Amino acid sequence: MNWRGRAISTVLTTLLLVWTLVVVGAGPDQQQSPGIIDQGDGRFAIGNIVLDKPDRSFTIPGQILRVNGPLEYLAVTTGGLKSYESLLELNVTAFEFNTACLLIGLDPDNSRPSPYHFDPNPVVGDEVKISVSWTLDSKPVEYDAADLLTVRESVAAPGGWSYTGSGFTRENRYLAHLDGTLIGFAHDPASVIEHGKGLGLGDYGAVNGHQGRLPPVGTEVVLTVRR
């Protein structure tokens, strides 16, 4: 990238970081705002996130947290409060995750998140594809995220993930940061990304990890989000 392209990229990065701070709100959580490292050619590092802006995608390392349900989340942050209901734990903060979403062009103005947990109505937001990969016997394995979930022992419908951006408390605290919720499917207003139609709504305990596809708990994985 020449100097002019790098200058434009730097300005864009700065603007997006400011936008992120506005989205997550001022106040006590603001000191958690992530740093963005421009690696050139449209690639950025945000903590453990590797972002490819031309491809409109980013990857995050993590691990299988649990397989048996009840599950309400695909992924939470490290040590997230809802870890006991999540398939994956990702090595990332909610601020870093949301920043990456913004950098690939996901727009919170297009979202209509659920007003309350287990809301049966569909959520609205920019659609994304989510996949999870790992290595098994020296060979790469990759699945669409929904293919790793079952609802009453039937494989969940593929796709259907939407960026909702998470919400705020009355004190302007970012819910995704407080709860550690990144990607959910029980229509939790705190999730940054939600399954549009929801999974297992009104049927608590219906969603589990796919026993025949998932590796053991603790296996290192990589989650990819693509616009």
Image (cartoon, helix red, strand yellow):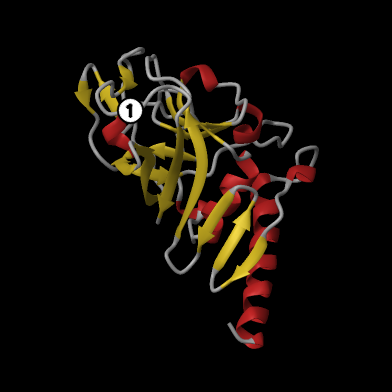
At a point 63% along the width and 62% down the height, the residue shown is 16
Total labels: the figure holds 1
Residue 61: percent from left, percent from top: 52, 42
Q: Seen from this angle, which residue lies furthest left? A: 154
Dividing the picture into quarters, in which one does residue 161 lie? top left
Q: Is residue 191 visible?
A: no
- Circle 1 residue: 214
At a point 42% along the width and 23% down the height, the residue shown is 72
With 204 as the anchor, is 41 left or right in this view?
A: right
At a point 70% along the width and 52% down the height, the residue shown is 21
Dividing the picture into quarters, in which one does residue 15 lie? bottom right
Q: Is residue 33 visible?
A: yes
* Quadrant the N terminus occupies: bottom right
- Vertical comparison of 164 with 109: above or below: above
- As helix, strand or loop, the secondary structure at mark 1 comes to loop
At a point 68% along the width and 80% down the height, the residue shown is 7
- Vertical comparison of 123 with 224: above or below: above
